[in-house]
Image: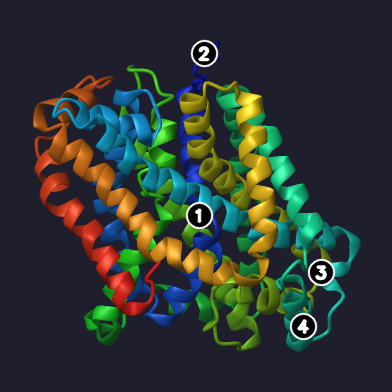
Amino acid sequence: MTEKRGSFKSSFGFILACIGSAVGMGNIWMFPTRVSLYGGGSFLIPYFIFVILIGFTGVTGEMGFGRSARSGPVDAFGIACEKKGKRKVGETLGMIPVLGSLAMAIGYTVVMGWILRYTVGAFTGFSMSMDSAEEYAAAFGEMASAFGNDGWQIVALVLCMAILMLGVGHGIEKANKVMMPAFFGLFVILAVYVAFQPGAREGYQYIFRIDPVALKDPATWIFALGQAFFSLSVAGSGTLIYGSYLPDQEDIPASAGRVAIFDTLAALLAALVIIPAMAMTGAQLNQGGPGLLFIYLPNLIHTMAGGSVIMIVFFVAVFFAGMSSLINLYEAPIATVQEKLRLGRIPACALVGGFSVIISLVIQGIVSDWMDVLSIYICPLGAGLAGIMFFWVLGKDYVEEQINKGREKKYTKAFYPVCKYLYIPVCILVLVLGIVLGGIG
Protein backbone atom coordinates (compact mmCIF):
# COMPACT_ATOMS: atom_id res chain seq x y z
CA MET A 1 0.00 0.00 0.00
CA THR A 2 1.43 3.39 -0.97
CA GLU A 3 1.48 6.44 1.23
CA LYS A 4 -0.85 9.37 0.67
CA ARG A 5 0.83 12.03 -1.49
CA GLY A 6 2.33 14.87 0.47
CA SER A 7 1.43 18.52 0.04
CA PHE A 8 2.56 21.96 1.10
CA LYS A 9 0.79 23.18 4.21
CA SER A 10 0.76 26.84 3.22
CA SER A 11 1.17 29.08 0.19
CA PHE A 12 4.07 30.79 1.96
CA GLY A 13 5.86 27.47 2.45
CA PHE A 14 5.38 26.55 -1.21
CA ILE A 15 6.76 29.89 -2.41
CA LEU A 16 9.79 29.60 -0.12
CA ALA A 17 10.44 26.07 -1.39
CA CYS A 18 10.28 27.27 -5.00
CA ILE A 19 12.54 30.20 -4.20
CA GLY A 20 14.90 27.71 -2.57
CA SER A 21 14.92 25.58 -5.70
CA ALA A 22 15.81 28.62 -7.82
CA VAL A 23 18.35 30.25 -5.50
CA GLY A 24 21.60 28.36 -5.83
CA MET A 25 25.16 28.52 -7.03
CA GLY A 26 24.17 30.24 -10.26
CA ASN A 27 23.08 33.26 -8.23
CA ILE A 28 26.27 33.30 -6.18
CA TRP A 29 29.18 32.16 -8.34
CA MET A 30 27.94 33.01 -11.83
CA PHE A 31 25.62 36.05 -11.73
CA PRO A 32 28.13 38.53 -10.21
CA THR A 33 30.78 37.40 -12.69
CA ARG A 34 28.49 37.94 -15.66
CA VAL A 35 27.39 41.33 -14.39
CA SER A 36 31.09 42.20 -14.20
CA LEU A 37 32.04 40.76 -17.59
CA TYR A 38 29.11 42.15 -19.57
CA GLY A 39 28.94 45.79 -18.58
CA GLY A 40 27.15 45.94 -15.23
CA GLY A 41 23.78 47.54 -15.83
CA SER A 42 24.07 46.66 -19.52
CA PHE A 43 23.76 43.00 -18.47
CA LEU A 44 20.98 43.69 -15.96
CA ILE A 45 18.63 45.15 -18.59
CA PRO A 46 18.36 42.01 -20.78
CA TYR A 47 18.53 39.82 -17.66
CA PHE A 48 15.43 41.48 -16.19
CA ILE A 49 13.64 41.15 -19.53
CA PHE A 50 14.35 37.42 -19.72
CA VAL A 51 13.44 36.84 -16.05
CA ILE A 52 10.04 38.42 -16.70
CA LEU A 53 9.55 36.34 -19.85
CA ILE A 54 10.57 33.00 -18.32
CA GLY A 55 8.81 33.64 -15.01
CA PHE A 56 5.62 34.57 -16.88
CA THR A 57 5.78 31.52 -19.16
CA GLY A 58 8.02 28.65 -18.06
CA VAL A 59 7.74 28.87 -14.27
CA THR A 60 3.97 29.44 -14.39
CA GLY A 61 3.51 26.67 -16.96
CA GLU A 62 5.50 24.04 -15.07
CA MET A 63 3.68 24.82 -11.82
CA GLY A 64 0.33 24.57 -13.59
CA PHE A 65 1.27 21.37 -15.42
CA GLY A 66 2.38 19.72 -12.19
CA ARG A 67 -0.76 20.68 -10.30
CA SER A 68 -3.04 19.52 -13.10
CA ALA A 69 -1.37 16.09 -13.24
CA ARG A 70 -0.90 15.69 -9.46
CA SER A 71 2.26 13.76 -10.26
CA GLY A 72 5.86 14.02 -11.37
CA PRO A 73 7.07 14.43 -14.96
CA VAL A 74 6.65 10.76 -15.97
CA ASP A 75 2.93 10.54 -15.23
CA ALA A 76 2.36 14.18 -16.24
CA PHE A 77 3.83 13.56 -19.70
CA GLY A 78 1.91 10.27 -19.86
CA ILE A 79 -1.38 12.02 -19.07
CA ALA A 80 -0.68 14.59 -21.78
CA CYS A 81 -0.13 11.89 -24.42
CA GLU A 82 -2.90 9.56 -23.22
CA LYS A 83 -5.69 11.19 -25.23
CA LYS A 84 -3.72 10.36 -28.38
CA GLY A 85 -3.24 6.76 -27.25
CA LYS A 86 0.47 7.34 -26.64
CA ARG A 87 0.73 7.23 -22.85
CA LYS A 88 3.82 5.01 -22.88
CA VAL A 89 5.55 7.41 -25.25
CA GLY A 90 4.74 10.28 -22.91
CA GLU A 91 6.02 8.38 -19.87
CA THR A 92 9.23 7.51 -21.68
CA LEU A 93 9.80 11.17 -22.59
CA GLY A 94 8.99 12.11 -19.00
CA MET A 95 11.98 10.11 -17.85
CA ILE A 96 14.31 12.61 -19.58
CA PRO A 97 13.74 15.46 -17.08
CA VAL A 98 13.57 13.00 -14.15
CA LEU A 99 16.90 11.37 -15.01
CA GLY A 100 18.31 14.81 -15.78
CA SER A 101 17.23 16.03 -12.35
CA LEU A 102 18.80 12.98 -10.70
CA ALA A 103 22.05 13.42 -12.61
CA MET A 104 22.13 17.13 -11.77
CA ALA A 105 21.45 16.30 -8.10
CA ILE A 106 24.34 13.82 -8.08
CA GLY A 107 26.69 16.45 -9.49
CA TYR A 108 25.36 19.06 -7.07
CA THR A 109 26.01 16.63 -4.21
CA VAL A 110 29.72 16.85 -5.00
CA VAL A 111 29.54 20.65 -4.84
CA MET A 112 27.59 20.50 -1.56
CA GLY A 113 30.38 18.37 -0.13
CA TRP A 114 32.83 21.17 -0.93
CA ILE A 115 30.49 23.79 0.54
CA LEU A 116 29.93 21.80 3.74
CA ARG A 117 33.68 21.41 4.24
CA TYR A 118 34.26 25.15 3.85
CA THR A 119 31.23 25.99 6.02
CA VAL A 120 32.46 23.84 8.90
CA GLY A 121 35.98 25.10 8.15
CA ALA A 122 34.78 28.67 8.65
CA PHE A 123 34.04 27.76 12.27
CA THR A 124 37.16 25.64 12.85
CA GLY A 125 39.60 27.96 11.10
CA PHE A 126 40.34 25.78 8.05
CA SER A 127 38.73 28.25 5.64
CA MET A 128 40.92 31.06 7.01
CA SER A 129 44.13 29.06 7.21
CA MET A 130 45.60 29.86 3.76
CA ASP A 131 47.61 33.01 3.05
CA SER A 132 47.37 33.38 -0.73
CA ALA A 133 45.19 32.57 -3.74
CA GLU A 134 47.77 29.93 -4.71
CA GLU A 135 47.32 28.15 -1.37
CA TYR A 136 43.52 28.28 -1.67
CA ALA A 137 43.80 26.95 -5.24
CA ALA A 138 46.00 24.07 -4.08
CA ALA A 139 43.58 23.21 -1.26
CA PHE A 140 40.60 23.34 -3.63
CA GLY A 141 42.42 21.25 -6.25
CA GLU A 142 43.08 18.55 -3.67
CA MET A 143 39.48 18.66 -2.42
CA ALA A 144 38.00 18.58 -5.93
CA SER A 145 40.12 15.65 -7.14
CA ALA A 146 38.87 12.09 -7.45
CA PHE A 147 37.86 10.80 -3.99
CA GLY A 148 39.23 14.00 -2.46
CA ASN A 149 36.24 14.91 -0.28
CA ASP A 150 34.35 11.68 0.40
CA GLY A 151 33.33 12.20 4.02
CA TRP A 152 31.92 15.71 3.69
CA GLN A 153 30.08 14.74 0.51
CA ILE A 154 28.40 11.77 2.19
CA VAL A 155 27.37 13.91 5.16
CA ALA A 156 25.84 16.54 2.84
CA LEU A 157 23.82 13.85 1.05
CA VAL A 158 22.67 12.29 4.33
CA LEU A 159 21.48 15.69 5.57
CA CYS A 160 19.55 16.22 2.34
CA MET A 161 17.92 12.78 2.46
CA ALA A 162 17.00 13.20 6.13
CA ILE A 163 15.02 16.32 5.23
CA LEU A 164 13.40 14.61 2.24
CA MET A 165 12.41 11.58 4.30
CA LEU A 166 10.27 13.84 6.47
CA GLY A 167 8.10 14.55 3.45
CA VAL A 168 6.84 17.64 1.69
CA GLY A 169 5.14 19.50 4.54
CA HIS A 170 7.31 18.41 7.45
CA GLY A 171 10.61 18.21 5.56
CA ILE A 172 10.90 20.33 2.41
CA GLU A 173 8.56 23.11 3.55
CA LYS A 174 9.92 23.44 7.10
CA ALA A 175 13.54 23.32 5.95
CA ASN A 176 12.98 26.10 3.43
CA LYS A 177 11.12 28.20 6.00
CA VAL A 178 14.39 28.25 7.93
CA MET A 179 16.97 28.27 5.14
CA MET A 180 15.54 30.89 2.79
CA PRO A 181 14.90 33.68 5.34
CA ALA A 182 18.31 32.90 6.85
CA PHE A 183 19.98 33.10 3.43
CA PHE A 184 18.48 36.50 2.64
CA GLY A 185 19.14 37.81 6.15
CA LEU A 186 22.78 36.74 6.11
CA PHE A 187 23.43 38.20 2.68
CA VAL A 188 21.79 41.49 3.70
CA ILE A 189 24.21 41.59 6.66
CA LEU A 190 27.13 41.02 4.29
CA ALA A 191 25.86 43.68 1.88
CA VAL A 192 25.57 46.24 4.68
CA TYR A 193 29.06 45.39 5.94
CA VAL A 194 30.60 45.70 2.48
CA ALA A 195 28.79 49.00 1.85
CA PHE A 196 30.73 50.65 4.65
CA GLN A 197 34.13 49.48 3.47
CA PRO A 198 36.53 51.82 1.64
CA GLY A 199 36.46 51.33 -2.12
CA ALA A 200 33.02 49.70 -2.28
CA ARG A 201 31.60 52.72 -4.09
CA GLU A 202 33.47 51.84 -7.28
CA GLY A 203 31.80 48.45 -7.27
CA TYR A 204 28.32 49.95 -7.04
CA GLN A 205 29.09 52.38 -9.82
CA TYR A 206 30.09 49.50 -12.04
CA ILE A 207 27.01 47.40 -11.25
CA PHE A 208 24.56 50.11 -12.25
CA ARG A 209 26.35 51.83 -15.11
CA ILE A 210 25.09 51.40 -18.66
CA ASP A 211 27.72 50.66 -21.30
CA PRO A 212 26.15 51.15 -24.76
CA VAL A 213 28.80 48.96 -26.38
CA ALA A 214 28.06 46.05 -24.05
CA LEU A 215 24.31 46.54 -24.49
CA LYS A 216 24.70 46.17 -28.26
CA ASP A 217 26.89 43.08 -27.95
CA PRO A 218 24.90 39.88 -28.75
CA ALA A 219 26.96 38.01 -26.13
CA THR A 220 25.45 40.19 -23.39
CA TRP A 221 21.95 39.15 -24.42
CA ILE A 222 22.86 35.50 -24.96
CA PHE A 223 24.42 35.05 -21.53
CA ALA A 224 21.68 37.10 -19.85
CA LEU A 225 19.19 34.65 -21.39
CA GLY A 226 21.20 31.67 -20.16
CA GLN A 227 21.53 33.15 -16.67
CA ALA A 228 17.78 33.82 -16.38
CA PHE A 229 16.78 30.47 -17.85
CA PHE A 230 18.91 28.33 -15.57
CA SER A 231 18.50 30.50 -12.49
CA LEU A 232 14.71 30.09 -12.56
CA SER A 233 15.07 26.29 -12.65
CA VAL A 234 12.84 25.54 -15.63
CA ALA A 235 13.84 22.00 -16.60
CA GLY A 236 10.56 20.06 -16.65
CA SER A 237 11.23 18.52 -13.24
CA GLY A 238 11.74 20.49 -10.01
CA THR A 239 9.16 23.25 -10.49
CA LEU A 240 6.72 20.76 -11.99
CA ILE A 241 6.97 18.36 -9.04
CA TYR A 242 6.55 21.15 -6.49
CA GLY A 243 3.50 22.31 -8.42
CA SER A 244 2.02 18.81 -8.13
CA TYR A 245 1.74 19.27 -4.35
CA LEU A 246 -0.38 22.43 -4.67
CA PRO A 247 -4.10 22.72 -3.89
CA ASP A 248 -6.47 24.11 -6.51
CA GLN A 249 -6.89 27.26 -4.41
CA GLU A 250 -3.32 28.41 -5.13
CA ASP A 251 -2.93 31.36 -7.52
CA ILE A 252 -0.12 29.97 -9.68
CA PRO A 253 0.73 33.06 -11.79
CA ALA A 254 1.06 35.13 -8.60
CA SER A 255 3.27 32.46 -7.01
CA ALA A 256 5.47 32.26 -10.11
CA GLY A 257 5.89 36.03 -10.06
CA ARG A 258 7.03 35.99 -6.43
CA VAL A 259 9.54 33.23 -7.16
CA ALA A 260 11.01 35.23 -10.06
CA ILE A 261 11.22 38.39 -7.94
CA PHE A 262 12.97 36.75 -5.00
CA ASP A 263 15.34 34.76 -7.17
CA THR A 264 16.36 38.02 -8.85
CA LEU A 265 16.77 39.70 -5.46
CA ALA A 266 19.05 36.86 -4.37
CA ALA A 267 21.22 37.31 -7.45
CA LEU A 268 21.37 41.08 -6.95
CA LEU A 269 22.28 40.63 -3.27
CA ALA A 270 25.15 38.36 -4.27
CA ALA A 271 26.35 40.93 -6.80
CA LEU A 272 26.05 43.74 -4.23
CA VAL A 273 28.30 41.75 -1.90
CA ILE A 274 30.84 40.23 -4.28
CA ILE A 275 31.47 42.98 -6.86
CA PRO A 276 32.09 45.79 -4.31
CA ALA A 277 34.19 43.40 -2.21
CA MET A 278 36.40 42.69 -5.20
CA ALA A 279 36.53 46.41 -6.04
CA MET A 280 37.81 47.15 -2.53
CA THR A 281 41.04 45.34 -3.33
CA GLY A 282 41.24 46.41 -6.96
CA ALA A 283 40.75 42.79 -8.08
CA GLN A 284 39.06 42.03 -11.39
CA LEU A 285 35.99 39.78 -11.18
CA ASN A 286 36.68 37.66 -14.23
CA GLN A 287 36.61 34.25 -12.58
CA GLY A 288 33.26 32.53 -12.08
CA GLY A 289 32.26 29.06 -11.01
CA PRO A 290 33.85 27.13 -8.14
CA GLY A 291 37.08 29.13 -8.39
CA LEU A 292 35.29 32.27 -7.27
CA LEU A 293 33.65 30.55 -4.31
CA PHE A 294 36.52 28.41 -3.03
CA ILE A 295 39.64 30.33 -4.09
CA TYR A 296 39.23 34.04 -4.82
CA LEU A 297 36.52 35.02 -2.33
CA PRO A 298 38.03 33.14 0.66
CA ASN A 299 41.41 34.68 -0.19
CA LEU A 300 39.75 38.11 -0.20
CA ILE A 301 37.68 37.56 2.95
CA HIS A 302 40.62 36.38 5.05
CA THR A 303 42.33 39.77 4.47
CA MET A 304 39.28 41.80 5.57
CA ALA A 305 38.71 43.22 9.04
CA GLY A 306 36.54 40.70 10.90
CA GLY A 307 37.29 38.16 8.18
CA SER A 308 36.64 35.11 10.35
CA VAL A 309 33.08 36.27 11.11
CA ILE A 310 32.46 37.26 7.49
CA MET A 311 33.67 33.82 6.38
CA ILE A 312 31.17 32.12 8.71
CA VAL A 313 28.24 34.28 7.61
CA PHE A 314 29.10 33.87 3.93
CA PHE A 315 29.48 30.10 3.87
CA VAL A 316 26.48 29.42 6.10
CA ALA A 317 24.37 31.47 3.66
CA VAL A 318 25.89 29.62 0.69
CA PHE A 319 25.21 26.28 2.38
CA PHE A 320 21.53 27.14 2.86
CA ALA A 321 21.21 28.21 -0.78
CA GLY A 322 22.88 25.04 -2.01
CA MET A 323 20.94 22.65 0.24
CA SER A 324 17.57 24.12 -0.75
CA SER A 325 18.44 23.54 -4.42
CA LEU A 326 19.73 20.02 -3.77
CA ILE A 327 16.48 19.08 -2.02
CA ASN A 328 14.50 20.21 -5.06
CA LEU A 329 16.71 18.32 -7.51
CA TYR A 330 16.26 15.05 -5.63
CA GLU A 331 12.50 15.43 -5.15
CA ALA A 332 11.43 14.55 -8.72
CA PRO A 333 13.44 11.28 -8.84
CA ILE A 334 12.21 10.30 -5.35
CA ALA A 335 8.58 11.04 -6.25
CA THR A 336 8.97 9.01 -9.45
CA VAL A 337 10.37 6.04 -7.52
CA GLN A 338 7.41 6.28 -5.14
CA GLU A 339 4.91 6.40 -8.00
CA LYS A 340 6.41 3.67 -10.18
CA LEU A 341 7.73 1.21 -7.61
CA ARG A 342 4.90 1.80 -5.10
CA LEU A 343 7.38 2.50 -2.34
CA GLY A 344 6.90 4.58 0.78
CA ARG A 345 8.72 7.87 1.23
CA ILE A 346 11.57 6.59 3.39
CA PRO A 347 12.44 3.52 1.24
CA ALA A 348 12.33 5.68 -1.91
CA CYS A 349 14.72 8.22 -0.35
CA ALA A 350 17.01 5.41 0.81
CA LEU A 351 17.07 3.83 -2.65
CA VAL A 352 17.78 7.11 -4.47
CA GLY A 353 20.26 8.20 -1.80
CA GLY A 354 22.15 4.90 -1.89
CA PHE A 355 22.48 5.02 -5.67
CA SER A 356 23.47 8.68 -5.60
CA VAL A 357 26.18 8.35 -2.98
CA ILE A 358 27.98 5.75 -5.11
CA ILE A 359 27.79 7.71 -8.37
CA SER A 360 28.64 11.05 -6.71
CA LEU A 361 31.81 9.56 -5.23
CA VAL A 362 32.85 8.16 -8.60
CA ILE A 363 32.38 11.44 -10.52
CA GLN A 364 34.23 13.75 -8.11
CA GLY A 365 37.13 14.27 -10.48
CA ILE A 366 34.93 14.97 -13.53
CA VAL A 367 32.00 16.82 -11.95
CA SER A 368 32.58 20.00 -13.96
CA ASP A 369 32.23 18.17 -17.29
CA TRP A 370 29.30 16.18 -15.87
CA MET A 371 27.39 19.35 -14.99
CA ASP A 372 28.26 21.04 -18.29
CA VAL A 373 26.71 18.22 -20.31
CA LEU A 374 23.53 18.36 -18.22
CA SER A 375 23.15 22.13 -18.41
CA ILE A 376 23.82 22.23 -22.14
CA TYR A 377 21.62 19.33 -23.23
CA ILE A 378 19.25 17.95 -20.61
CA CYS A 379 17.89 21.02 -18.79
CA PRO A 380 16.69 22.97 -21.86
CA LEU A 381 15.46 19.72 -23.45
CA GLY A 382 13.42 18.89 -20.33
CA ALA A 383 11.98 22.40 -20.18
CA GLY A 384 11.09 22.32 -23.87
CA LEU A 385 9.43 18.90 -23.60
CA ALA A 386 7.35 20.00 -20.61
CA GLY A 387 6.32 23.11 -22.53
CA ILE A 388 5.34 21.10 -25.61
CA MET A 389 3.28 18.65 -23.53
CA PHE A 390 1.41 21.38 -21.66
CA PHE A 391 0.95 24.03 -24.31
CA TRP A 392 0.86 22.04 -27.55
CA VAL A 393 -0.43 18.58 -26.65
CA LEU A 394 -2.94 19.44 -23.90
CA GLY A 395 -4.00 22.61 -25.67
CA LYS A 396 -5.44 26.05 -25.03
CA ASP A 397 -8.66 25.17 -23.19
CA TYR A 398 -6.91 22.81 -20.80
CA VAL A 399 -4.06 25.23 -20.08
CA GLU A 400 -6.34 28.20 -19.43
CA GLU A 401 -8.59 26.14 -17.14
CA GLN A 402 -5.61 25.00 -15.06
CA ILE A 403 -3.90 28.40 -14.86
CA ASN A 404 -7.12 30.15 -13.83
CA LYS A 405 -7.81 27.80 -10.91
CA GLY A 406 -7.45 29.65 -7.64
CA ARG A 407 -7.64 33.09 -9.25
CA GLU A 408 -10.31 35.68 -8.55
CA LYS A 409 -9.81 37.19 -12.00
CA LYS A 410 -9.00 35.33 -15.22
CA TYR A 411 -5.38 35.47 -16.25
CA THR A 412 -4.38 37.40 -19.35
CA LYS A 413 -5.30 35.81 -22.67
CA ALA A 414 -1.78 36.58 -23.87
CA PHE A 415 -0.41 33.82 -21.62
CA TYR A 416 -1.16 30.87 -23.89
CA PRO A 417 0.08 32.26 -27.24
CA VAL A 418 3.23 33.73 -25.65
CA CYS A 419 4.05 30.38 -24.07
CA LYS A 420 3.25 28.35 -27.16
CA TYR A 421 4.91 30.52 -29.77
CA LEU A 422 7.68 32.29 -27.83
CA TYR A 423 8.68 30.32 -24.72
CA ILE A 424 9.12 26.96 -26.43
CA PRO A 425 11.27 28.44 -29.23
CA VAL A 426 13.32 30.10 -26.48
CA CYS A 427 13.93 26.66 -24.94
CA ILE A 428 15.12 25.41 -28.32
CA LEU A 429 17.31 28.50 -28.70
CA VAL A 430 18.91 27.91 -25.28
CA LEU A 431 19.65 24.31 -26.29
CA VAL A 432 21.18 25.31 -29.64
CA LEU A 433 23.22 28.20 -28.24
CA GLY A 434 24.47 25.99 -25.43
CA ILE A 435 25.68 23.40 -27.91
CA VAL A 436 27.29 25.97 -30.20
CA LEU A 437 28.94 28.06 -27.45
CA GLY A 438 29.75 25.25 -25.03
CA GLY A 439 27.16 26.36 -22.49
CA ILE A 440 25.41 29.62 -21.63
CA GLY A 441 24.04 28.77 -18.19
**From the viewer's perspective, is the residue at label 3 or at label 2 nearer?**
2
Badge number at residue 4: 2
Residue at coordinates 31% horizontally, 31% vertically from top-left?
A: 76
C-alpha gap between disc 1 and disc 2: 34 Å
Q: Badge 2: how crowded within 10 Å, few (<14), some, or many (20+)?
A: few
Amino acid type of the residue tagged 3 in the rendering: Ser
Determine whether the residue tagged by mark 4 lies in a helix, strand or loop: helix
Amino acid type of the residue tagged 2 in the rendering: Lys
C-alpha gap between disc 4 and disc 1: 30 Å
Q: Badge 3: how crowded within 10 Å, few (<14), some, or many (20+)?
A: many
**From the viewer's perspective, is the residue at label 1 or at label 2 nearer?**
2
| Front one among 343 and 20 | 343
Amino acid type of the residue tagged 4 in the rendering: Ala
Image quarter of the N terminus: top right
Badge number at residue 127: 3
Residue at coordinates 39% horizontally, 31% vertically from top-left?
A: 243
Q: Are marks 1 and 3 in contact (CB under 8 Å)?
A: no
**From the viewer's perspective, is the residue at label 2 or at label 4 nearer?**
2
Amino acid type of the residue tagged 1 in the rendering: Ala
Which comes sooner in the sequence, label 4 or label 3?
3
| Front one among 345 and 223 | 345
Q: Are marks 4 and 3 in contact (CB under 8 Å)?
A: no
**From the viewer's perspective, is the residue at label 4 or at label 1 nearer?**
4
Instruction: From the image, tell me which residue sits under label 1.
Output: 266
Which comes sooner in the sequence, label 2 or label 4?
2
Which comes sooner in the sequence, label 4 or label 1?
4
Q: Is any atom of residue 189 visible in this view?
A: no
- In the picture provided, is 415 more to the left or to the right than 358? left
Determine whether 373 is above or below 161 in the image: below
Which comes sooner in the sequence, label 1 or label 2?
2
